[in-house]
Image (tube, grey):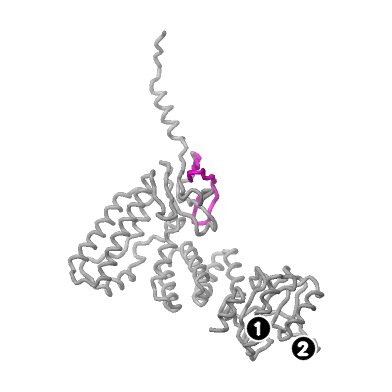
Amino acid sequence: MKLIIMKNPLFLLCLFVSFATFAQHHIQGQFSPAESFNFALLYHVTPTGTNYVEQAKTDTDGNWSIDLDADSEIGIYKIVYATPVEDNNFDVFYNGKESISLLFDVETGLHFTASEENKLWQTYTDSILKINSSIGRYYMSQKTDSSEITAIFKNLKSTQDFYEKESTDMMISPFVKSNKTYIPSTYEDVSSYSLNLKKHYFDYMDFSNPLLQSSDFLNERVTAYVFAMPEDANYYKMAVDDVVKATNDTDEAKIMVLENLWKIMIDKQQPDVANYISDTYLLPLAKTFNRTYLLETLEDYNKSAIGKKAMDFNFTYLENSKVIKTNLHSFNTKKSTLLIFWSSGCGHCLEELPKVKTLMAQHPEITVLAYALEDGVRNWNQTIEHFPSFIHTYDLKKWDSPLIKAYGVSATPSYFVLDSDKVILAKPEHVEDLETYFNE
């Protein structure tokens, strides 16, 4: 057997280096309990959008894996594990240098088993959470030993400094720095500490950083600040003003966090605050920066938002066999109005309207305007005989009626309670909600 001597032994080394350079990385995980999960969706998140990358099915043990191309961008990636996607996801850091392995349990949460970047971030956040819990316990116990809280603050500072140094030149570095909070140098009572914590909350937050803008970090921190305030619309508005001031030089981040707050205020039934965010800040920003979709969304919302004047429309109805032509704003100007969008072909409407009839008989101060979405009048004529106390009108465009979009009607029946000036007071979802509203 001949011994083969390579003329260029460096060739093999270069070959290995080449393979290593272009090797694929992967993101893999295990979801638990396995039977609760079917898939994992991967998205690459940037300040301007969320881009689908790949998906994987989970096996019987909840395992899944997604390969990343050699040219995959470094940055923030979002893993979606259930629907609705906006409520069932988490972010990971991909630095282009290492694969990521993780465990996600619905009870215990997220844990990284591979990826120094993600493991360091998780260790840092766990450490800070424990220290902050110690601060909370100290002040809640009303202890008088100032040396104890001073030691806790010293630990907080050393921990923050340690992780800032450890994360130097890493993707997580701006997150660690932006997560820093106010740390007293001497003893402070709970009142002074709380005031200073609020005053300096945004001091270290880098709203201009594109990685921070790509993640949920800024939205989560801003939301935590706003909802730490007393549950009152005026306090929330002042907190929103603080957020705007903190993001003054970063319009991209300002729009992002305000839009998120606006949506949350709608979900939490804080229409006064949602309208304040929209009218004072978001609408002008959307116009200035030509955010067409956001502008259309806000304008559509304002057409039927609680606290806004309902959009006017013309309609015709019969009163004592006399045809009356009018419009919403001129109609029933002395009393409140319950506007109902319904259809004579809607089974759910036919179930709820008799209940509405009974309820409204107890509230003669309210006029019911029943706006029917129809494709013919035969069934409508027969049905309205059962509701003689209602004011009836119809629209033969049915679901193509322009009022469907204007009032955000996605199902029938839909209820709108209007005052005498046609300002929307409430939008109860079901007849039971209507009963609650009128019987309060």
Q: Which residue is mark 2?
A: 319
- Type of the residue with mark 1: Thr
Q: Residue 243: image x %, image y %?
A: 42, 69
Position of residue 362 relative to residue 249, above or below, is below
Position of residue 286 relative to residue 159, above or below, is below
Closer to viewer: mark 1 or mark 2: 1
Q: Examine the rendering and report whether any part of residue 142 can be seen.
A: yes
Position of residue 60 relative to residue 175, above or below, is above
Give residue 15's quadrant in the image.
top left
Q: Residue at x 70, y 74 (%)?
A: 350
Position of residue 259 relative to residue 367, above or below, is above
In the foreground, 299 or 128: 128
Numbered label attached to residue 358: 1
Q: Which residues are magenta?
A: 44-69
Mark 1 and mark 2 in contact? Answer it, CB < 8 Å. no
Give residue 7's quadrant in the image.
top left
The reply, left or right, for residue 151 in relation to residue 195 is: left
Q: Residue at x 27, y 56 (%)?
A: 159
Majority secondary structure in the magenta region: strand
Q: Residue 419: image x %, image y %?
A: 60, 85
The reply, left or right, for residue 105 in relation to residue 430 is: left
- Type of the residue with mark 2: Glu
Q: Residue 143: image x %, image y %?
A: 21, 71
